[in-house]
Image (tube, rainbow, N blue to C red):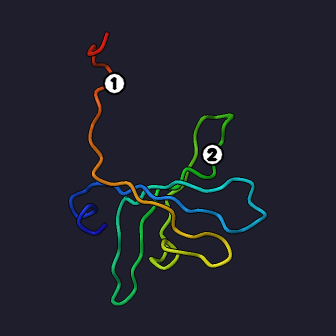
Amino acid sequence: MVNQLDALQPVGFSWEHTDLHKKSGGHYMVVRGYILLGDVKLVVVNDPSPWNKCKCQGGSLKIISYSDYVEYPGRYTHGYDDYDFKPVNTHSKQGR
């Protein structure tokens, strides 16, 4: 993950909820950076929550510990990571 972020490439990741009070199965966010403070590892995250659907805007920037990124016992476990994103030309006339 560090190599991706050092190359200014985001890393998408998911959390799978283990808390039975949550109605959805997971949550997807994007890591946009990291911070090292001595032995403390922090992860800078773009979180789409909270989303205001009336204004079609929202989300938040969070800084969380690396251990919370990996797992929060009783609430969630780490799901999967997405990286090496490639641009997609959505305006291509190929295939028409």
Three-letter amino acid code of the residue under disc 1: Thr
Callout 1: SS: loop
Q: Using a 10 Å C-alpha cutoff, classify the residue at mark 2 as few (fewer than 14 neighbours), some (14 to 19) or many (20 or more).
A: few
Of 54 and 68, the residue lying toward us: 68
Any mark on residue 25, and which? none
Left or right of 8? Residue 16 is right
Q: Position of residue 21 (x, y in %)?
A: 78, 63
- Circles 1 and 2: CB distance less than 8 Å? no
Q: Earlier in the sequence, mark 1 or mark 2?
A: 2
Direction front: furthest residue? 95
Check disc 1: other Cα within 10 Å, few if <14, some if 14-19, many if 20+. few
Q: How many marks?
A: 2
Question: Residue 1 appears in which quarter of the rendering?
Answer: bottom left
- The quarter of the picture where residue 6 lies is bottom left
Residue at the right extreme of this rendering: 21
- Say if 7 sits above or below 75 in the image: above
Q: Residue at x 28, y 27 (%)?
A: 89
Q: Residue at x 50, y 64 (%)?
A: 62
Please, what is the three-letter code of the amino acid marked with disc 2?
Trp
* Residue 65 relative to residue 7: left or right: right
Inter-mark Cα distance, 1 to 2: 25 Å
List the residue tagged with mark 2. 51
Q: Residue furthest top?
A: 96
**Place of residue 43 in the rendered image (x, y in percent of width and height, measured from the top left):** 42, 70
* Secondary-structure class at tag 2: strand
Q: Residue at x 68, y 76 (%)?
A: 74
Tell which tag, 1 or 2, sits nearer the viewer: 1
Q: Which mark identifies residue 90?
A: 1
Spot occupied by residue 27 in the image (x, y as percentages of width and height): 58, 55
Horizontal and vertical percent for residue 33? 35, 64
Quarter of the figure with the C terminus: top left
